[in-house]
């Protein structure tokens, strides 16, 4: 598998992974850091994140659950280099993401906001 920066041409595949419009994903590629993991030319997942106020915020983690660990390494690596914390909101129904976050060293720090009526849990790592 190969990790690379997302490009605008990836927007259609990213949209299919998230059930969101292609234009939304195209804007995501322009507005955030977006890394994709692909295998033999097929995108298997992506992570998007941005950084502000000493924290890297993971804004989306999507794709095959088998690539979540690899995808989470990207914002964590960036945060370590910049001596920042990383924060991730995990929907209650996403046990694979929760497991990947825990394996990557994230700790549960409390409840997060509701998205589309679903509760989230806030996970954070302060390991620079």
Image (cartoon, rainbow, N blue to C red):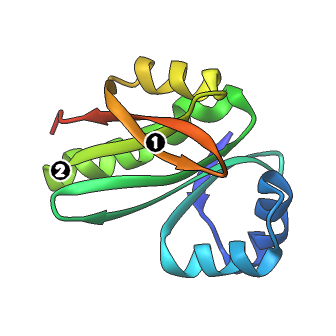
Q: Secondary structure at mark 1?
A: strand
Q: Earlier in the sequence, mark 2 or mark 1?
A: 2
Residue at image position (52%, 24%) is: 98
Residue 9 horizontal/vertical position (percent): 77, 77
Q: Nearer the viewer, residue 4 or 48?
A: 48
Q: Quadrant of residue 23?
A: bottom right
Closer-to-camera residue (109/69) = 109
Left/right of residue 13 with respect to residue 120 in the rendered view: right
What residue is drawn where x is 43% and y is 18%? 103
Up-down relation of residue 15 to residue 29 (above or below): above
Q: Quadrant of the N terminus?
A: top right
At a point 13% along the width and 49% down the height, the residue shown is 83
SS at badge 2: loop
Q: Which mark is residue 89?
A: 1
Query: Vertical placement of 32 versus 77: above or below?
Result: below
Which image quarter holds the C terminus?
Answer: top left
Checking the image for residue 84, the label placed there is 2
Judge left or right: residue 40 versus residue 66. Answer: right
């Amino acid at each position: 598998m190969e990790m690379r920066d997302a490009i605008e041409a990836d927007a259609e595949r990213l949209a299919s992974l998230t059930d969101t419009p292609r234009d939304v994903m195209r804007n995501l590629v322009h507005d955030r850091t977006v890394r994709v993991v692909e295998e033999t030319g097929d995108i298997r997942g992506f992570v998007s994140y941005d950084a502000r106020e000493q924290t890297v915020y993971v804004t989306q983690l999507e794709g095959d659950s088998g690539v979540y660990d690899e995808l989470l390494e990207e914002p964590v690596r960036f945060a370590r280099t910049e001596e920042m914390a990383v924060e991730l909101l995990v929907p209650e129904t996403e046990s694979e993401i929760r497991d990947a976050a825990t394996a990557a060293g994230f700790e549960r720090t409390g409840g997060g906001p509701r998205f589309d009526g679903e509760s989230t849990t806030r996970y954070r790592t302060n390991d620079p």
